Image: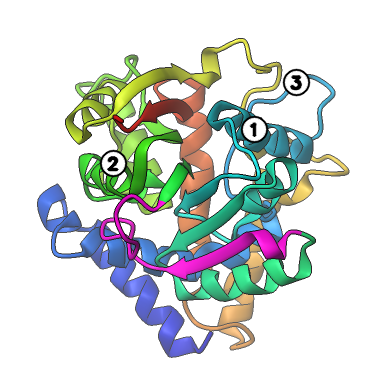
Amino acid sequence: METEVLEEKVTDYNKIFNEKDYSKRAGEGGAQKATNNFYTLVTEFYEKGWGESFHFAPRFKGESFKASIIRHEHFLAVKLGLSSKDNVLDVGCGVMGPARNIAHVSGAHITGITINAYQIERCKILNKASTVNHLLDVKQGDFMAMPFPDNTFDKMYAIEATCHAPSLVGVYKQVIGKLKPGGKACFYEWAMTDKYDPNNPEHVQIKKDIEYGNSICELSTTAEIDVAIKEAGFIKDETIDLVHANYGNDVPWYLTLQSGWSLSQTRHTKVFRTFTQYMLNTLEFLHIVPKGTGEAHRILIIAADSLPAGGKLEIFTPMYLVCVRKPE
């Protein structure tokens, strides 16, 4: 990316999140602009540091990080009851790592939607290189105004994506509109739990850091998500915080972000992130990498520090499972 473009996107991102008033921050396309800028800045970092699936997962003792990620995706496919007969939408698809894994196990046809042009190009490259390219499509668009006819898809899912929406009810209404009657949707939602205390300064700061470090204008609580489901017109089948469910949580979901040196996970650790920050700052000073690269990485460090903080206090969950249906 050209220096001017990267620096401009970092500046715009910080300007949006320096706005204290939520309505001003998220209004008039602010949330969409912030998210688009964010993923232009961080997608390459995510792929190199995390892989092609940008999400967390419960993890059994002895289970590898990659295996837990794939299992979490397959679990969603099972919850949806996916088969080769289904036409499915991945809402906020990233680079379609989950879609490729889900297509492998289900045979379903999956269309991804992302607002970000860089991610679209990565999807096309990665899909073409996979063995399930014939089952995959991708379209650029805003999931607050999905570019599909109503009653198009049999099923839909979103994996840690709709937290970027300026209105959770709004994105849920988009989903229900594009689903066929009786169609099912499942979401892994980021949320503040019932242990979050808005009068506790430490809790409030952790929430703000998670939002800033991950391009989220306002994190919802689990209770607010349940209300949004009803307001959008869904029939609720299930909502459950998988962090506390009997679903393989032998290893805390946030451990990968804070663990020490290991042969397989060093690129995820705090030590490695700190080293990378110093390296990028130096390379930026020497004009070897574009100006703004160090600031983009700093945003990710704030995310990587605040997420475990929220996890340890049990005030935040990245895997509030929502399973809903559109009325017949």
Question: Magenta segment, which residues?
Answer: 132-152
2 or 3: mark nearer the eye: 2
Q: Nearer the N terminus, badge 1 or badge 2?
A: 1
The residue lying at 74 percent from left, 51 percent from top is 267
Q: Is residue 76 magenta?
A: no
Q: Name the element at disc 2.
A: helix
Query: Is residue 126 shown above or below 171?
Result: below
Query: Is residue 56 shown above or below 213?
Result: above
Residue 21 visible in this rendered orientation of the protein: no
Label 1: how many Cα within 10 Å (few below 14, some 14–19, many 20+): many
Residue that badge 3 annotates: 60
Task: Describe residue 257's horizontal placement relative to residue 228 as left or right.
Answer: right
Q: Nearer the N terminus, badge 1 or badge 3?
A: 3
Q: Report how far apart the C-alphas of labels 1 and 2 lie in the structure.
A: 22 Å
Task: Describe residue 65's horizontal placement relative to residue 32 as left or right.
Answer: right
Q: Report how far apart the C-alphas of labels 1 and 3 lie in the structure.
A: 11 Å
Give me the disc on residue 72: 1
Q: Is residue 147 magenta?
A: yes
Q: Say what amino acid the circle numbered 2 marks.
A: Tyr
Task: Describe residue 216's horizontal placement relative to residue 319 as left or right.
Answer: left
The residue lying at 45 percent from left, 17 percent from top is 240
Residue that badge 2 annotates: 172
